[in-house]
Image: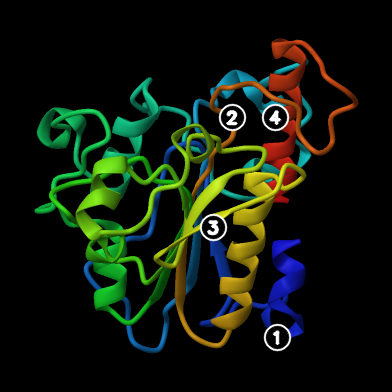
Amino acid sequence: MWNDLLGSNHGGSPSARNLSVLVWGLLFVGLTSAFAEDAKPNVILFMADDFGYECLSCDGSKDYQTPNLDRLAETGIRFEHCYANPVCTPSRDQIMTGRYNHRNYEGFGYLNPNETTFGNLLKQVGYRTAIVGKWQLSGDAQTVQDFGFENHCLWNMHAHKVAETGRQLPDPETWRNRYWAPALFIDGEWKLHSEDQYGPDICRDYALSFIDKHRDEPFFLYYPMMLTHDPFLPTPDSEGKGSQKENFTDMVEYTDKVVG
């Protein structure tokens, strides 16, 4: 799906505009202080939430089918001695800043406004930047743009952050839902979605639109997913209402589908 959107001009032969998918669990490779002006690869970084190595069929799992992620593992580079924080929010702090959590994690849902992220660095060298998926960070009235992201489609902007900016907060029970009928913060505005709309699909479509819009210029898309964090709910591909274990299996395989 992602490759199809890039079109024929972004096909198999290497070029300065080729899409570089640098993705595997919690890794990001390729950030430097600057890229040469004539060689700025496009970068998409996926980060799954609460997704362990045991979820990947390429790592020997018999319970989950992940053909798209398996293909990335087969054709790309595998890093087999890497560690992530076992909790979701500190992991996002860490990967965005490149700093271990004992140096930068000050509290749940907080990203220090003095931190520099890979969004800041890539924007400084001429990249168009976007973040889609899960945010769940705040910090002294900072905005997503302050951390280097020009565009965003995000779940869970904090209530006090919204109060500071004067924006209207949706019903508390609604804005907490990340999957069905989500309330998402899209380019500075709250948007409520209907019961048949699925948050990961909305984020995927926003990401594809961003890629299409900026296909002729260097871009950085960071996609920290809502999947596969609880609650464990059916996906659009689920057959009826399953158990939590069955739903989690469907969520793992839907993660693979979104990447593919």
How far is mark 1 from mark 3, CA to CA? 34 Å
Dot placed on the residue nearer the N-terminal end, 2 or 3: 3
How far is mark 4 from mark 3, CA to CA? 24 Å
Q: Quadrant of residue 210?
A: bottom right
Q: Secondary structure at mark 3?
A: strand
Q: Nearer the viewer, mark 1 or mark 3?
A: 3
Is disc 4 surrounded by few (<14), some (14 to 19) or many (20+) residues within 10 Å?
many
Residue at image point 74% right, 20% down: 247
Q: Which mark is residue 228?
A: 2
Q: Are marks 2 and 3 in contact (CB under 8 Å)?
A: no
Dot placed on the residue nearer the N-terminal end, 4 or 3: 3
Say which amino acid is labelled 1.
Asn
Is residue 80 shown left or right of residue 199?
A: left
Q: Which mark is residue 191?
A: 3
Q: Nearer the viewer, mark 1 or mark 4?
A: 4
Dot placed on the residue nearer the N-terminal end, 1 or 4: 1
Q: Nearer the viewer, mark 1 or mark 2?
A: 2
Q: Nearer the viewer, mark 2 or mark 3?
A: 3
Residue at image point 71% right, 18% down: 61
Q: Which mark is residue 251?
A: 4
How far is mark 2 from mark 3, CA to CA? 22 Å
Give whichever of 20, 203 is nearer the camera. Answer: 203
Dot placed on the residue nearer the N-terminal end, 2 or 4: 2
Residue 89: horizontal and vertical position, in percent? 34, 33
Residue at image point 79% right, 28% down: 65
What residue occupies the far right of the structure in this picture? 239
Question: Height in image: 15 above or below 116?
Answer: below
Is residue 33 shown left or right of residue 131?
A: left
Is disc 1 surrounded by few (<14), some (14 to 19) or many (20+) residues within 10 Å?
few
Residue at image point 22% right, 64% down: 146
